[in-house]
Amino acid sequence: MSVDTRVDLSNGLENVPVFIERSSAVMTFPEFQYSTDNIQGPGCTADPTEVTLPGCSCRSRSCCAESCTCLRTRGRAYDSAGALLTLGPTDSGYCSPVFECNALCACSDACSNRVVQAGLRLRSEVYGAVNKGWGVRTLEAIPRGTFVCEYAGEVIGLEEARRRQLAQSSEDNNYIIAVREHAGTGAVAETFVDPAAVGNVGRFLNHSCQPNLFMQPVRVHSLVPRLALFAGRNIDAQEELTFDYTGGYSNRLPVELLSTQRDADIRASRSDGLQRKECRCGADNCVRLLPLDLSIINRE
């Protein structure tokens, strides 16, 4: 009987191991601290691990919409199998937040409204992706709407995000993700997460202009959301996992506008002084440059 000697990147912190492909061992592996949770970083005024949301009093194994205060207030986000019911951002381009039952709820851990907090359930592997550095592929098939992993790291403020972006050289990877979501009464909430020094398997996911994952802010115990990644379509085993770094799900620019967008991005890369990197996702609708949220830099 053969013994699997692959290294678990998470060192046992995840429910299932996150493997590193043996043949990729010759590549220089980045140094970082593995964490399954977000941590509070500079400029973040709230502790992401602190329980601040109210809980329900449901005593059943799983909450039902008729009696659960969580579901009645926030709405049902998942079906009975734990798949997300609404896939991707709204027409406005902003996500609508999802709220799960939390540590103050009386329901059990088996409640169908506890999905992201249950942690990693799917086996994956970090590997050397051709022309893209490190990437992540799934080792099993993933149905549409399934939670895949979080994009965990330091939750930082706008000023710190700006400082870190401006301090990066052309050789540095930009890991900072900015997610904007509806916060009621027309307001928009922003969350900035940087997994460069502290993060999880999500930090190795590559961008694609035609991704198979999308990012959804999910609030569990804290008002600080977790940046959860869900399957936007059925995904085959051994397929690379990707998401759109801009926070969208798919680039739907009409074909006749793609060349115009590409030219604009190239001009921007020459003028913003940040030396944006070439996108190598290979999608038919690729805009040729990796996304960079210039609003972080240019905000008044």
Image (tube, rainbow, N blue to C red):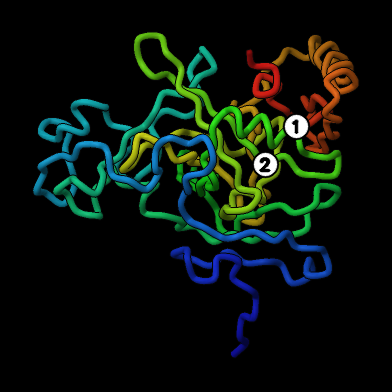
Asked whether 290 or 34 is in front, the reply is 34
Instruction: Identify the secondary structure beneath mark 2.
Output: loop
In this image, 54 relative to 81: left or right?
left
Instruction: Identify the secondary structure beneath mark 1.
Output: helix
Residue 246, given in percent of the width and then of the height, sits at: 64, 27
Q: Is residue 218 visible?
A: no
The image quarter in which residue 52 lies: top left
Q: Nearer the viewer, mark 2 or mark 1?
A: 1
Residue on which disc 1 sits = 166
Q: Which mark is residue 175?
A: 2
Above or below residue 94? Residue 221 is: below
Q: Which image quarter holds the N terminus? A: bottom right
Kindly identify the residue that appears in the image at 76 percent across and 43 percent down: 173
Above or below residue 146? Residue 252 is: above
Q: Which image quarter holds the C terminus? A: top right
Asked whether 295 or 246 is in front, the reply is 295
In this image, 227 relative to 49: left or right?
right
Q: Amino acid at mark 2?
A: Tyr
Earlier residue among tags 2 and 1: 1
Instruction: State the CA–CA distance, disc 2 to disc 1.
Output: 13 Å
Kindly identify the residue that appears in the image at 26 percent across and 27 percent down: 74
Q: Residues within 10 Å of mark 1 (few under 14, many from 20)?
A: few
The image quarter in which residue 105 lies: top left
Q: Amino acid at mark 1?
A: Leu
Q: Residues within 10 Å of mark 2 (few under 14, many from 20)?
A: some
Residue 97, given in percent of the width and then of the height, sits at: 39, 28
Residue 66, given in percent of the width and then of the height, sits at: 12, 30
Q: Which mark is residue 21?
A: none
Q: Is residue 275 visible?
A: yes
Residue 217, given in percent of the width and then of the height, sits at: 45, 33
Outermost residue, bottom direction? 1
